[in-house]
Amino acid sequence: MHKKNLALIAIISLIALAARFIPHVPNFSPLASVMLFAGVYGQSKKYIILPLIALFISDIFLGFYKLEIMLAVYGSLAIIALIGFWLKKHKNILNVTSSTLGSALLFFLLTNFAVWYFGSWYSHDLAGLALCYNLAIPFFKSTLAGNIVYGTLLFGVYEGATYMIKEQKLATKK
């Protein structure tokens, strides 16, 4: 499965790249789910680089932004992949669901903190931080919805297909 999973993660990363160019609700993205998936099903930690490369390629065309904020975005996604590495050994429906929801919260907290800290849109005090997080809530809702939809698709289809293949192999052995 080593090379098959690498190919699968590469294909999913390309789809995530293409999804950035299709009109969509802001932050309704497959990227966090792809990172979590790569962490769980990648045979090596180097697999997480594929979705990050896809993100970088899309940023070349869509435009770069403040470096520190970009690093927070990329770093948040890398941490989500690390959650996937943990999830690999603790995979069950509750942990997958918790990781999917937690990934959205982690992304929201880290990236918006970076926007407040490194950006110039908000005052650098507690009121500015609160305003930053408050104004980001609609984006958080979209991130959460995207993680739920794409996470369910990625994990559900993969696990369903794996189950069906195992059942088919058992049926042919009888």
Image (spheres, helix red, strand yellow):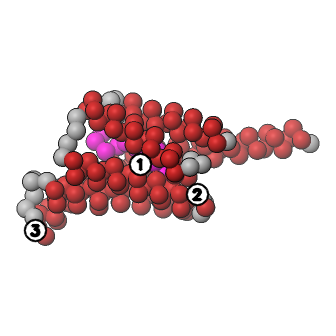
Q: CA distance from mark 2 to mark 1?
A: 16 Å
Task: Name the residue that disc number 3 marks.
Answer: 125
Where in the figure is residue 26, as x and y percent of width and height? 28, 42
Along the line of sight, which residue is nearer the eye, 19 or 17?
17
**Residue, x 38% and y 51% (percent of image)?**
77
**Going by the image, does 14 lie left or right of 162?**
left
The residue lying furthest to the right in this view is: 174
For the point 19% across and 55% down, which residue is it? 115
Camera-nearest residue between 166 and 115:
115
Asked which secondary structure carries label 3, the reply is loop
Where in the figure is residue 122, as x and y percent of width and height? 10, 58
Spatial CA distance of label 3 from label 1 is 29 Å
Instruction: Name the image quarter holding residue 62.
Output: top left
Mark 1, Cα crowd under 10 Å, few <14 / some 14-19 / many 20+, is many
Category of crowding for the residue at label 2, using alpha-carbon neighbours closer than 10 angstroms: few (below 14), some (14–19), many (at least 20): some
Quadrant for residue 125, please give it. bottom left
Q: Amino acid at mark 1?
A: Ala
Question: Which residue in the protein does label 1 denote?
Answer: 32
Q: Residue at x 44, y 44 (%)?
A: 49
Figure check: 98 above or below 138? below
The magenta-colored residue range is 24-37
CB atoms at circles 2 and 1 under 8 Å apart? no
**Cβ atoms under marks 3 and 1 closer than 8 Å:** no
The image position of residue 120, as x and y in percent, is 9, 54
Name the residue tied to disc 2.
88
Q: Label 3 is placed on what type of residue? A: Asp
